[in-house]
Amino acid sequence: MYRDRVKYYAINKRTDYTSLLKRLLFVFCGAMLTAIALQLLLMKNNVIDGGIVGVSIILSHMTSIEVGFFLLLINTPFFFIGYSYLGKRFILLSLFAIFILSFFTHLLEPVPSITQNPLIVIFLGGGLLGFGVGTVIRFGGSLDGTEILAILFSRRSSFSIGQIVMFFNFFIFSSAIFIFGLKEAVVSLATFFIAYKTIDYTIK
């Protein structure tokens, strides 16, 4: 009986370890895809994402400080909220995701945008962004403080995570009109619409 119990716990521990490695791998890929979408398609075309990422892009544009710095700074209090309600694994995966996102946005900073075509930016950029963010959420992490709030609110309402995030971002995209211009704000909103649809599809 004792040997069976030890064997059972050993198998469960190995399964948990494998599960964590799998989550880390997918979170890594999701964060990397998000960085590619941001640096190679969106930011260099003055197209912003929503949430804390969008705020970080605006602040980076205004101060010339790298966006990764603002991502870490502004997201920190939201991670503490996430830790209180969503657990240790969530905060670990989220911090890992933000670290990977910050690292790759820094690495890709010198690389020029792969296109300036607004339609490609909207559909390819929005699709990559949504798939990257959705993958991180699906495997237990988050790249953005507003996503943490959206996850919590979605558990207590009939609204999806994407719908809640879109509500938060209405105010961010409105401010983009005054900073980047009307055209860029409209392209940003269209890009995020594609992204949020992709997020909902990815996490189903």
Image: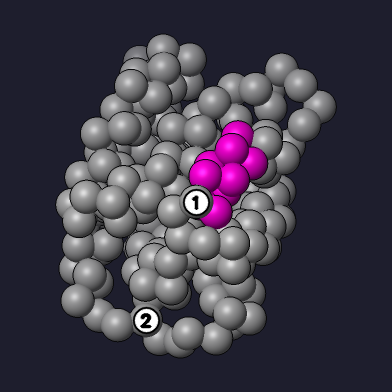
SS class of the residue under badge 2? loop
Judging depth in this view, the residue of 52 and 139 nearest the camera is: 52
As rendered, which of 114 and 182 lies closer to the eye? 182
Residue in view at x 81 percent, y 27 percent:
158
Mark 2 is surrounded, within 10 Å at the Cα level, by few (under 14), some (14 to 19) or many (20 or more) other residues, namely: some
Magenta part of the chain: 168-177
Residue indicated by mark 2 = 113
Q: Earlier in the sequence, mark 2 or mark 1?
A: 2
Q: Which mark is residue 178?
A: 1
Q: Which mark is residue 4?
A: none
Left or right of residue 128: residue 92? left
Kindly check if marks 2 and 1 are in contact, taking CB atoms under 8 A apart as contact.
Answer: no
Q: Answer above or below: position of 199 versus 108.
A: above
* Magenta stretch, overall SS: helix
**Residue 180 position (above or below residue 27):** below
Residue 33 shows up from this direction: no
